[in-house]
Amino acid sequence: METPTERDAGALRRVVIEGLRPAVEGGLVKRTVGEPLVVEADVFGDGHDVVAASLLLLAPGTERWREVPMEPLGNDRWAGTATVAELGTWWYAVRGWVDRFATWRRGTLRKLADGQDVGVELAEGAVLAAAAAERAAEPVATTLRAVATGFRDGDTAVLVDDDPGFATTMTRLAERADATTTTPLELLADRPRARFSAWYELFPRSAGAKSKHGTLSDVEDLLPYVAGMGFDVLYLPPIHPIGTTHRKGPNNSLTPGRKDVGSPWAIGSAEGGHDAVHPALGTDADVAHLAIAAARLGVDLALDLAFQCSPDHPWVTEHPCWFRHRADGSVQYAENPPKKYEDIYPIDFETEDRDGLWSALLDVVLHWVDLGVITFRVDNPHTKPFAFWRWLLAEVRLRHPEVIFLSEAFTRPRVLEALAKVGFDQSYTYFTWREEPWELEQYFTELTQTDLVEYLRPNVWPNTPDILPEHLQTGGPAMFPIRAVLAATLAASWGIYGPAFELGEHRPRAPGGEEYLDSEKYQLRSWNLRSKTSIAPLLTRLNAVRAAHPALQQDRTLRFHPVDGDDLLCYSKRSPDGTDVVLCVVTTQSAEPRTGVVHLDLAELGVHEDQPFELHDLLDDRRYTWQGPDAYVALDPATQPAHIFEVVRPNAVATR
Amino acid sequence: METPTERDAGALRRVVIEGLRPAVEGGLVKRTVGEPLVVEADVFGDGHDVVAASLLLLAPGTERWREVPMEPLGNDRWAGTATVAELGTWWYAVRGWVDRFATWRRGTLRKLADGQDVGVELAEGAVLAAAAAERAAEPVATTLRAVATGFRDGDTAVLVDDDPGFATTMTRLAERADATTTTPLELLADRPRARFSAWYELFPRSAGAKSKHGTLSDVEDLLPYVAGMGFDVLYLPPIHPIGTTHRKGPNNSLTPGRKDVGSPWAIGSAEGGHDAVHPALGTDADVAHLAIAAARLGVDLALDLAFQCSPDHPWVTEHPCWFRHRADGSVQYAENPPKKYEDIYPIDFETEDRDGLWSALLDVVLHWVDLGVITFRVDNPHTKPFAFWRWLLAEVRLRHPEVIFLSEAFTRPRVLEALAKVGFDQSYTYFTWREEPWELEQYFTELTQTDLVEYLRPNVWPNTPDILPEHLQTGGPAMFPIRAVLAATLAASWGIYGPAFELGEHRPRAPGGEEYLDSEKYQLRSWNLRSKTSIAPLLTRLNAVRAAHPALQQDRTLRFHPVDGDDLLCYSKRSPDGTDVVLCVVTTQSAEPRTGVVHLDLAELGVHEDQPFELHDLLDDRRYTWQGPDAYVALDPATQPAHIFEVVRPNAVATR
């Protein structure tokens, strides 16, 4: 027979802790430094004894758990709040125990109120106080010994006066030997930019003068343009030497000319691999210089991590076992049968030399971090093992907790989510293909009002070099502002692939496809940034509005409001403290004017039904006074596809 | 630096498994033997390789895991089904792995369809087939070697013909070294009676002739009465010797007379404790005889497990350390300050002699099991540690998996649920206090349509010796049938405290309280079972309907249908195979006739909108033909408080 003590290693843990939130199955919870962490759990014991609970926190790089008292919310639910003040990996847990002093105190007070003799109770209280004194430091210990003496003398003052200091002290000093503590959960505390960011992607080789191969120095010259629009992350596709074997020509053709530049994602040549800079772009020093120049303008330089090789990559000969060899001895190229991608060798993460490979990939990241790059966009992370990312990201963060990783996983939902769970700070989403109001409402409700919000930070892009969505191809120039407004206000992080986006590039390589015609992926392009049709002014305005409004700097408070009227979407966001409220109304189609009636949840906006409130349109600076939940709206995509209202309340106070 | 292999103990587990259901945090899942177990999980890997998954099952008392293939449901969700065929504790888990053969097969077939050369692919297929042959027994191994030879010779027949046997064999023989397997979860397989039961509680000392102390032999004489009403569990309050110290008199008075019998829950006297029979009731042999006689009528005898002692219990002197001693040396009696229960000593589960105490309590249970008692109603389990119950129930089941435990925990929701999680088969519920249609709908929707259904089996009681609810005090005779119909049809397990219930006993000891006047808890009572106002005939009918209709023998398919009309509740249940459908309409108040319009979810009933269907009232045998979702109903509590319809469909086939 199994003895009872064998079953629970000697301790009788009377308190049960369940339903701990936040908790991410198979992954970690995310916050940015300064954000509150509210932890809730069901904490209860058998019988009628009083239970107490605390939130345990282990800060990055420390070994001593900090304890924050939790408060009961009713129905055995408890909550504790902490702020994660330092970058890095935190651990948290909930502890619960039977509070013998509080149990004694409650019963004794009730007996006193009932006029019963409490002589025995006071004798027992003296034992409790004396035991607590043993665990206390001075001067508390002396005080507690005095209380014990008082109890023995029948002095109930400290009890009857309900001295909160005494009760708190006793709870703090409670015997915890039989406490129940949950398995610690992991929390990643990131830089605020992981939560709130505006990304701008450009091909550095198109940054030069017309038909000349651009350089990192040319990119540096573009920094004022990018920063001037309010973008705070500048992301460059791979900057490494490009292979020549099976190089692709313009428009993905298989017959390149001698001068064709190839795809930056065909990484590696005799000139180097993932830790080298393409000679035509510059040097390591140029990278470091660009990173510093960007930082001076408040912009993070982001590089691409595309862990795949061209057939000419040095690793192919130096580490042949890092690639899969076929039955005929050839190296396995990338394929999605029947399609072949002969210019790319996938890395074989199942190699026997796992330590060697994984360490080399870590070294790649650390190399760029050493040059000042603390932001990475990761190409196709879903084609590499989750365990690899969990390891790599943890190893990088151990050394550099400020590094941010964006997951480019345009794949199935569970896979996309799993990458966020193992530690990616931000994730590309399906926004690019969500067009209708109901689709957008459903998707962003899922992103912001479910457990996803605890670990997946959406970074939404109207376009990428790989994706020119159908609505941008056919929607006319008015579709670009629409998608920009939606991206910049629905999500705290957004990005564009420019200058193609602000210049309205919309020609597909082939009808029905999403590839750009004359895509920069395969050739140099030249862009007229001074074009009169550029929507750079709108992008500038959008990023300025975002910077000025804390409501738009997070995703948790996104709420949709019903609209009677086709092709209209209405939503609001509140800042965490409730003082800033932004209300958006957007038409999702670009063809014709649209009218409708919005039905506002006034409580979300912090206004009362009988109270007029002013709406200040942050796009055109007009002001409106509304009252009550229903309002008529009219939007013309040709001139004004959206309202972004600041809600001005007569007596603005923190709500909720 | 942590090396990659340190991180995952050498294996690169590429498959992730999450969202496994059913799963009960901190507890076990329950089924009855013969019930299907459908296990679902998200199973996915990185990249584009084909993934396979299986459900692993470990039957009670075995050591070899059985493997059931799982099927994809779409969106990376997989499901596998097994039937738990034996009583006892099962374990289940989900395993997922990259199916290299299926990946190869899919790619090769696509290349063949595209007209590509597959010479290298066939060479690789030959390696896969040869490797599988190494893992196979004869004659499969020989077949696989022939396939490998065929591949090497360019023979694609077995591939192109899409031989399902070959593919299945290869999947079965797949290399699983890097498979991901979830932590096994516990499942308790009970007797069907744990799912479907009708309990009848009576005080054996009131079973005798008028004003004479009844005996277990008298109870045996009542078996035909109880079994005749269709009850299949006969539950007796504690049958042990009763203490005399601080004995309570009639109506809980503190001044009993010499002949007063005391409360059966004040267990223990010089005549014995929890393993003794009160001499006035009989002997161990009488218990065994009663259990056998009951079993002959299909009735389980259930005893009460009330782990508390009277001051006269032998343990108080034999094992003083099993009780808490106060500062003045006295034994702590039960109290809920300022209330005192001086006739009861709670057991101190935190005793230093935990092994001795817990083992003694286990021995108590085993003693009664040895006498043929395989059903227990546990008194106030929430005042003993959860860890104790987890241990006790597991220990009993290891020896006697047929034993059923009913938890009497009228306490807070999380505590009530936690007891079900640690292994109680059935649980008393809040039904006794749920009166209004909306309350009943909300509560039973929670019980049957949330995760609760995986581990908590409601056993609903209109009354107990401790609870005469207010509506039975004031609702008049018509309220008793109403509560009986609701209990018997809303839940697969129900029970009554009789004969007080069928005889309409409704007098409270004090207004505003829930105690019975002249409660059997403190005195003998005599009941006229032949009373003309007894509702025994209705109870008989209800239990007969339940026995004839599989729809009523489980809780998972309970669905509520909207009603326009006050005080009316409408709900249906389908049998798991969909062939049996029962529809109930009940008025919840007893004062006046009520009319309304029900709006049926016809799909739940398995009928079409344009198809008339017959309703056969199982209470009064009348038949109605309805069509469409809406129907007028009129119920008069004085004559007919409810319809219990069998839904008769023209072409009844299994639905859903």
Image (cartoon, coloured by chain):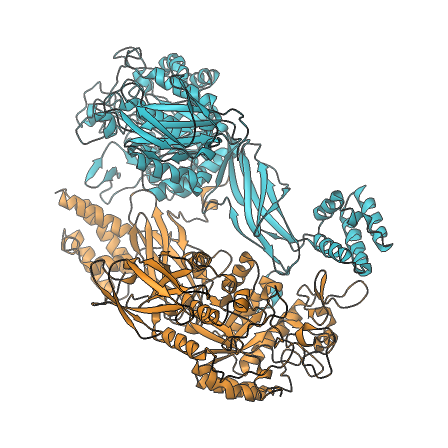
Chain colours: A orange, B cyan
Horizontal relation, residue A21 to residue A117: left or right: right
Residue B323 lies, with reference to residue B179, above or below; the image says above
Task: Confirm whether residue B482 shows in the render.
Answer: yes
Residue A15 lies, with reference to residue A196, above or below; the image says above
Quadrant where the image shows the N terminus of chain B: bottom right
User: In terms of image quadrants, where is residue B203?
Assistant: top left
Task: Confirm whether residue A191 shows in the render.
Answer: no
Q: Position of residue A495 (x, y in %)?
A: 48, 72
Q: Nearer the viewer, residue B446 or B87?
A: B446
User: In terms of image quadrants, where is residue B532?
Assistant: top left
Residue in the image at 33% along x and 56% along y: A79
Residue furthest toward the front? A592
**Total marks placed:** 0
User: In terms of image quadrants, where is residue B615?
Assistant: top left
Horizontal relation, residue B78 to residue A174: left or right: right
Q: Position of residue A249 (x, y in %)?
A: 70, 76
Q: Position of residue A356 (x, y in %)?
A: 66, 71
Residue furthest toward the left? A115
Horizontal relation, residue A193 to residue A386: left or right: left
Horizontal relation, residue A258 to residue B374: left or right: right
Residue B655 lies, with reference to residue A308, above or below; the image says above
Q: Position of residue B459 (x, y in %)?
A: 39, 31
